[in-house]
Image (cartoon, grey):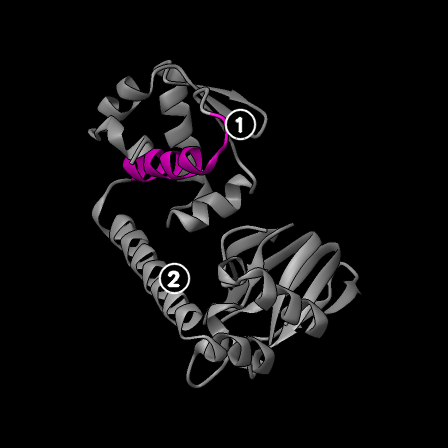
Amino acid sequence: MNFSIISLMSKTQLASLALLQEKRFYQAGTILFHQGKEANRMYVIEKGKVTLYRLMPNGEEKVFNVFLAGDVIAEMAMFMSPRQYPMTARVEQDSVLAIYKHTDIKKIVSQTPELAVSVMEYMTNKIHSLVNEINILTQVNANQRFVMKLAEIYKKQSTKDNKISLSITKKLLATQLGMTPETLSRTIKRLKDEGQLIEHGNSFQIKDIAVLCLSVNLTADIFYH
């Protein structure tokens, strides 16, 4: 499982939580929850794919994230006040999810001060990360945003061979970077034409990380720190 509230729990707490979980199969197209509805459940994907999106005022569906096996959905919503889902979640392919009630999550967290503090630190760091993402979207250009995203993905990978694999579509990547798909395509083409990137399907091979960063006026340490 990816880093989450659950990963902060001890073996005893995990055992208690396991007794309270419900596993369910969902068909592709199922809506897990709607934006604005009471957030009474948290989900862990054991198999499948779930999209988190929001309907914009013009009726357009804006996708914010795609969750895959090991990801946790709506964990922060369990501690919000009022406790509401900030977005809508849709199952994109047949999936198996573990379901946890918010009452069970909060009970386990509140029983141990050490866990409660760890959850507070985790939430604070996550909010700080989201604020940084907003700053990136508003303060740097498209080329820099793309390279910074590559660096973010690279740091999370277990292998460090200058190769970066995308787990999402380029359309979703463009949305996350606050640009149109056309702008993202032009950004990628420019870096490919300069010899900075080699594209293989849904992955990129970086010729030289330091040179790539220099070409967009960034420092190479964003790939390592």
Task: Identify the residue shown where x is 70% and y is 54%.
Answer: 46
Regarding mark 1 in the picture, which secondary structure is present there?
strand
Task: Identify the residue shown where x is 41% and y is 24%.
Answer: 189
Q: Quadrant of residue 125?
A: bottom left
* 105 left or right, relative to 142: right
Percent position of residue 98, x then y: 69, 64
Q: Which residue in the protein does label 1 denote?
A: 203
Above or below — where is 72 with respect to 75?
Answer: above
Percent position of residue 174, x then y: 44, 44
Give the residue type at disc 2.
Answer: Tyr
| Nearer-N-terminus badge (1/2) | 2
Disc 1 from disc 2: Cα separation: 30 Å
- Magenta range: 142-159
Q: Which residue in the protein does label 2 denote?
A: 122
Q: Quadrant of the C terminus?
A: top left
Give the residue type at disc 1.
Answer: Ser
Above or below — where is 179 with respect to 160?
Answer: below
